[in-house]
Image (cartoon, rainbow, N blue to C red):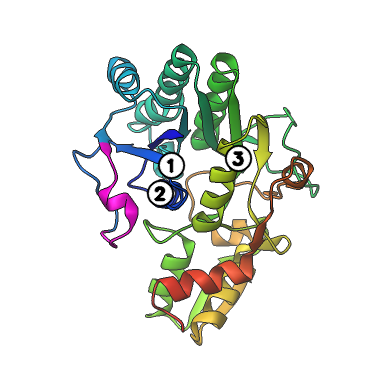
Amino acid sequence: MKIFVTGVGGQLGHDVMNELAKRGHAGVGSDIAPAYSGIQDGSAVCGMPYAQLDITDAAAVSRVLNDVKPDAVIHCAAWTAVDAAEDAENRPKVRAINVDGTRHIAQACRTLGCKMMYISTDYVFNGQGNEPWQPDCEDYAPLNVYGESKLGGELAVKELVVKRFIVRIAWVFGLNGNNFIKTMLRVGQTHDTLRVVDDQIGTPTYTLDLARLLADMIGTEKYGVYHATNEGGFISWADFAKEIFRQAGMSVNVIPVTTAEYGLSKAARPFNSRLDKGKLAENGFAPLPGWKDAVGRYLQAAGISE
């Protein structure tokens, strides 16, 4: 298959391109930078075909995708800075990228008749209650600008593309970019005690594991909305931090606090980010490995543990 991937300068796009290369697919990466700008780790993505693309430019999206003529598009590009999205000066750009940009990609996929995979988020829901969110639940009520914009992208894909996958993920970490693990490791170097939120519940997602699932999925016609995070049960951010420090061999005391006690975020965060992933197995897709195992492999790949 020829597969066009947006956002290859980010955590997920980087790993998706490498996974496609391992499987012999003809991957074409894209991002807004003139050339690939992710980590130069010698992996396949660094040498694979690349097309500069500003997804907010409808004409450019149409032109590039018509030139490439992919069998499928995996749309990883997004504005993901949740707190910065709340700033009035950023809101038009957030919408331009996450809603309008996604619509441009979807329109091009519709014209070409190709598959489209859109990466979404638990933030499309209101984050209340204790029950895991079902993939086909449409009780949307995003709490912040980022969530609203990602929901707008979902609706555009549903409106325009028949051969579509929408995959919601949460608490993402990968080698190519910033994430919670990197933040904890950095702050843990200078602090022996950290306050970490304990009333927001979900499960982490390792981009390396997710990329394998997405590559499995894109080769099928099992279209629909899916949830995909690592296995291993639901945890809090404080639980996540404790496991990171344990596996990294760092003596950092994690003090669990409520979101209200923490009180530093501009954007409202969901308390309930539990995502039901049963639909994966129902459609023959292997679940992602446990999140603790994923943390260990991540730390090893980052050269932090043996």
First-in-chain label (1 vs 3): 1
- Distance from Cα at disc 1 to Cα at disc 3: 13 Å
Amino acid type indicated by mark 3:
Met
Classify 134 as above or below 185. Answer: above
Residue picked out by circle 1: 25
Say what secondary structure mark 3 lies in. helix
Q: Is residue 112 left or right of residue 268?
A: left
First-in-chain label (3 vs 2): 2
Classify 13 as above or below 138. Answer: below
Amino acid type indicated by mark 1:
His
**168 inside magenta stretch:** no
Classify 253 as above or below 187. Answer: below
Residue for point 69% across, 63% down: 235
Q: Is residue 203 left or right of residue 86?
A: right
Say what secondary structure mark 2 lies in. helix
Residue picked out by circle 3: 217
Q: Which residues are magenta?
A: 40-50
Q: Is residue 126 visible?
A: no
Rate crowding at label 2 as few (under 14), some (14 to 19) or many (20 or more) other CA atoms within 10 Å: some
Amino acid type indicated by mark 2:
Ala
Q: Is residue 143 left or right of residue 34?
A: right
Q: Residue 230, located in which quarter of the rendered image?
A: bottom right
Label 2–label 1 contact, CB within 8 A: yes
